[in-house]
Amino acid sequence: MHSTRSVDLEEGNIEPDFQIGKKHRTWEGCCVKELFNGKKDQQPQLHHNSKEGYSLNLSPSTSPAALGDRERTCFNGMRNKSQDSGIAEMEELPVPHNIKISNITCDSFKISWDMDSKSKERITHYFIDLNKKENKNSNKFKHKDVPTKLVAKAVPLPMTVRGHWFLSPRTEYTVAVQTASKQVDGDYMVSEWSEIIEFCTGDYSKVHLTQLLEKAEVIAGRMLKFSVFYRNQHKEYFDYIREQHGSALQPSVKDNSGSHGSPISGKLEGIFFSCNTEFNTGKPPQDSPYGRYRFEIAAEKLFNPNTNLYFGDFYCMYTAYHYVILVLAPAGSPGDEFCKQRLPQLNLQDNKFLTCTEEDGAMIYHHAQDVILEVIYTDPVDLSLGTVAEITGHQLMSSSTANAKKDPSCKTCNISVGR
């Protein structure tokens, strides 16, 4: 049986328990959790109605006749106990309906609902059943996500649900609600479950990205000079650009590599460039994972006082080295407006990753040594502004970051809000 977690949202307590209380219900000396431990297809569900009180429902594949002697004795004991409890004489609690989700962020949301005023004064708690929506393309060999059962004291609605330990950014969830009344013996009388609704959490905010930025600054290392941005691709790619786009590189939507909550993934349009150099030569490396043909363009063509610089992401792919995504956007362009609303802006002359300064009338450029920079330029770039030539090194396919997933266990590049 999956263990579940209940969270008292008001007191902030996290405790393992059966889905409707702060302790395991026991009948005839037998614990529900122990009884069905390891039998996923026999998970019990505790329900209440006005005629029978509490009843323990098993899945369709299980009946008391299919249980062993100990399980059958315990099951019958639970059924008899619920019928004799006296709770059946009490009036049913109102069932939540018309559930509304609002103020959604990457790790919180507000929830409210309507309910009949009848017996409303007896409600002491709300039970919230929160689950990740099943992904048909998910890995069948991975463990399923543990359902989260939240226990909250009955507070005025809407109620805020917040917690990075059970909410991830950009993730679809289902939610249902029960009302509950705590009894003198510590058990709960509960309503029927509400309808199930779906919602999706949001992206990282600027606050969360600033936390990532600060972590990236710690390992950025010293600054090295560079003079060109470059982009590697196959020969066919550049032929296509010349024939179909008049020799102008076109922005495309960023893939889903990097942090799961990054607001630029799948949304920002741009062209990827690199600028890292070999420390012993000061020039771009001769190897590339993206193709044997390289477009090089002078740094000042893309990075100058008329462009704005933004921090986009910080991640790794289960390796010792880390990637920092930066965005260069011409001031006032659509890309600049997109970034201004969502990303932390960096000072062009003074930051830990990529700088542009003037010395004796010339522009001098530096990049961080200890991280791999991926620079997104948000406007089209004409090939006539630079050169295309074949590199002498190898194509390192294993180093590609296309749609690469971030290592969620890395303490260097993860923040507590999500992955």
Image (tube, grey):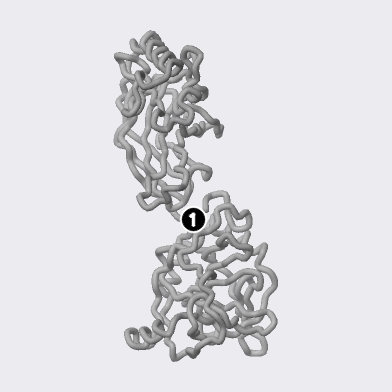
Q: Is residue 291 above or below residue 213?
A: below
- Residue 385 on image: x %, y %: 47, 89
Q: Secondary structure at mark 1?
A: loop
Count up the numbered dots.
Answer: 1
Residue nearer the viewer, 4 or 179: 4
Left or right, 8 with reference to 357: left
Residue nearer the viewer, 253 or 342: 253
- Residue drawn at (30%, 26%) of the image: 116
Left or right, 303 with reference to 36: right
Three-letter code, disc 1: Tyr
- Residue 292 on image: x %, y %: 49, 83
Instruction: Please say whether residue 386 is visible from this viewpoint.
Output: no
Residue nearer the viewer, 416 or 38: 38
- Residue drawn at (54%, 70%) of the image: 399
Q: Is residue 260 above or below residue 330?
A: above
- Residue drawn at (29%, 14%) of the image: 51
Crowd rating for badge 1 (residues with CA inside 10 Å; few <14, some 14–19, many 20+): many
Q: Is residue 227 above or below residue 373?
A: below
Q: What residue would you read off at disc 1?
A: 204
